[in-house]
Amino acid sequence: MTMTNPCPRPPAAAWTALTLLGLLTACGGPDVAAPPPPPPPPPAPVVNTAPNFLAGAIAQTGYDGNADDLLTGGLGKTGLLAAAAPAFANPLAPTPAELRRNAIFTNYRAVLDYSAAGGFGRLYGPNIDNAGNDTLGEGKIAGTEYIAVADDGTGKQNVVLMVQVPNSFDAKNPCIVTATSSGSRGIYGAIGSSGDWGLKHGCAVAYADKGSGNGLHDLMSDTVIQIDGTLASATAAGKKAHFKADIGDGERASYNAAFPNRVAYKHAHSQQNPEKDWGRDTLRAVKLAFYVLNEKYGNPIAGGTSKEVVLTPANTLVIASSISNGAGAALLAAEQDSEGLIDGVAVTEPQIQPAANSGLTIKFGADMVNNHSKPLVDYFTFANVYQPCAALSSQADQSLHAFYWPAAYAAAAQNRCAALKARGLLAGTTLAAQADEALAKMNDYGWSTATNFTQMSHFRLATNSIVMTYVNSYGRFKVTDNVCGYSFANTSASGDVIAQLPATQAGLFSTGNGVPPSGGINIVWNDSVGGAKLDFLAVSPTSATADFGLDGALCMRALATGKDPVSGATLFGNMKSWSDRVLAGVAEVQATAKLRGLPTIIVAGRSDTLIPVNHAARAYYGKNQLNEAATAKTRYYEVTNAQHFDSFLPAATLLGYDARFVPLHVYFVRAMDQMWAHLKNGTALPASQVVRTTPRAGGAALAATNVPPWSATPAAGDTIGFAAGTLTVPQ
């Protein structure tokens, strides 16, 4: 019988070709019976959809870079250096465009030494390009600005988010930089730091006001500031109000009768404890940026108006950044980033609270740091008690005395020392001894001696305002609670409560910083002997002297610790209840220092009196090393002769800061440049180290030699080390 070959052999040439193409069957012939399956269809495009946390529409405005722009509000370098912001055409009713322009003027300058001698316009500023050269003229940047509000539907949160997309944005090399506001500032609060750097690099900049900002509610007139900065009645504004105190009309009327001319402020009185959501808000700003970028650059989807998502975290470089509170928000966002949105972090002077840190020892030179990692409200209420007396120490240098302490304040500082002695909180028998003892207590509580010079200025301009705002915020108190007898109001030259000034109130969106004293609004102590007074002129019932209201300061200290600061006894009754609320709020804002191995640069000034490094930057870095020693990619650079407020440096003749300190902003720019190079090119991050600067002589111009870069390979005497739970920082 003849058998048919089941695998007939094709001609040799065909055999060779089929072999090369891999189309032979198992028996050596071509697979003609089972052709390969067709390729799978392409995946359906991912439709770009608006984030579900948005309340209302996204406002969009384009700026041509001439008449108006993203970075300078149309003012350019020259306008930003003017002695004052431009006047409003109608001071009682400025337009949203005028309010935006002046808010950019205020906020850009608020975080920088804006003097030419200090480096503005030469080492940094809108005219300085990415290579550090003066090539950008007025520094105006064309592009589109998007503003939205994140809320849960109640209008009680109303977190403002903004994305600025410069015309130089390259969708083939996309990047996003976060710019969460420093302090409690409004939406433009980081325009001079992250905003400036990001826009110049062609990145979209994602801003968030963190649920604070200039949210005023004038309780007498029932007037509020709207999202666009204009004023309206609370009824007319509705959910467009930046903030409305959560009290009924009857409660408001009763409060006005007992405490006329008071105002509520959002950060203090929103009852939201917004700090617990700073990380979330920063991540939401990034998500909003991805949405608007894909709306702008995404491919149209056939048959509709939707856009395809083409820019994603996988192909877009994202740097979380900012300064101060905004820096803390960036770190919190990195901790909470479960979606892989962020590629790296670069921040300066972070206000960050690393929670219980008993596993960490901090060694500064040869000395152990006795107190570190304290919560913000703990160390601020401590300062609020002792700082005005400590500021009188000869070790703090009283050269600032005439500027910061007019006669009434100088007397109050001396009365504070005497009152502390009378309460048994100081032992010294002379004013000099009491002042030295108070300063020694500050140093032991975490402020290094490098901060001594600025104790006076910080009490005068910052300490009491932080205490008032954060105690109220953490405890979720209503404005009508008058916690420890404090309230907000305008005051006269004699310290008495007066009505709001209409023209000042109309411009608060531009001039306020979200933490009174600000924009004419001051802190008032209702319990002062003789009636409500400006807190700096308040008379304590216990001492019967004008001692900066020590009784009120001790009350705030008690709420922050749960104990009577004089007797040490545990609180009871209403004080115990209120303290429990404050401490619960504090617990909500503590950081983990777990950065998931993200490349991170933290820069801080050694002389930071506002946010002392032992409680924030050093403590957080140390905890990160404890948590992630094997995987951490965090670097800490501590800059000598640098403090928190670069904006204090320009007033050289009054403050003396220029001859003692260098602008930390120089190192913010370098941190961003370093992280950019690392993420784009794989450039190694230098080891953690102390950067040693040289302050300029008073009145002299800052030179590059005053602010040297950190070293690629720091010397042993400059290297910050970590081993066996001990963070070692060279003197």
Image (tube, rainbow, N blue to C red):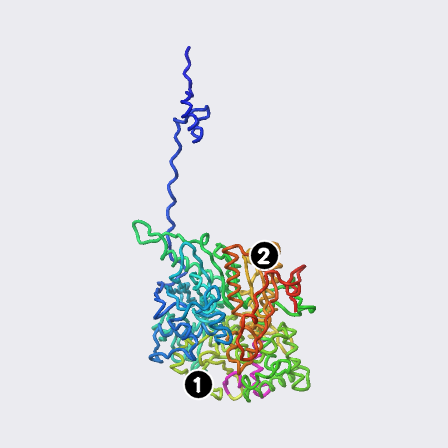
Give the residue furthest to the right: 366
Q: Nearer the viewer, residue 82 or 53?
A: 82
Query: The residue tagged with tag 2: helix, strand or loop?
Result: loop
Query: The residue tagged with tag 1: helix, strand or loop?
Result: strand
Q: Quadrant of residue 219?
A: bottom left
Q: Nearer the viewer, residue 38 or 239?
A: 38
Q: Which residues are magenta?
A: 531-557
Q: Residues within 10 Å of mark 2 (few under 14, many from 20)?
A: some
Give the residue furthest to the top: 1
- The spot of residue 70 in percent (x, y) is 39, 67
Q: Mark 1 = which residue?
A: 498
Please identify the quadrant where the N terminus is shown. top left
Residue at image position (52%, 89%) is 530
Please identify the quadrant where the C terminus is shown. bottom right
**Circle on res. 632:** 2
Q: Quadrant of residue 394?
A: bottom right
Tell me which amino acid carries mark 1: Ile
Residue 626 appearing in the image: yes
Q: Nearer the viewer, residue 15 or 437?
A: 15
Q: Residues within 10 Å of mark 1 (few under 14, many from 20)?
A: few
- The spot of residue 564 in percent (x, y) is 62, 76
> N-terminal of the two: label 2 or label 1?
1
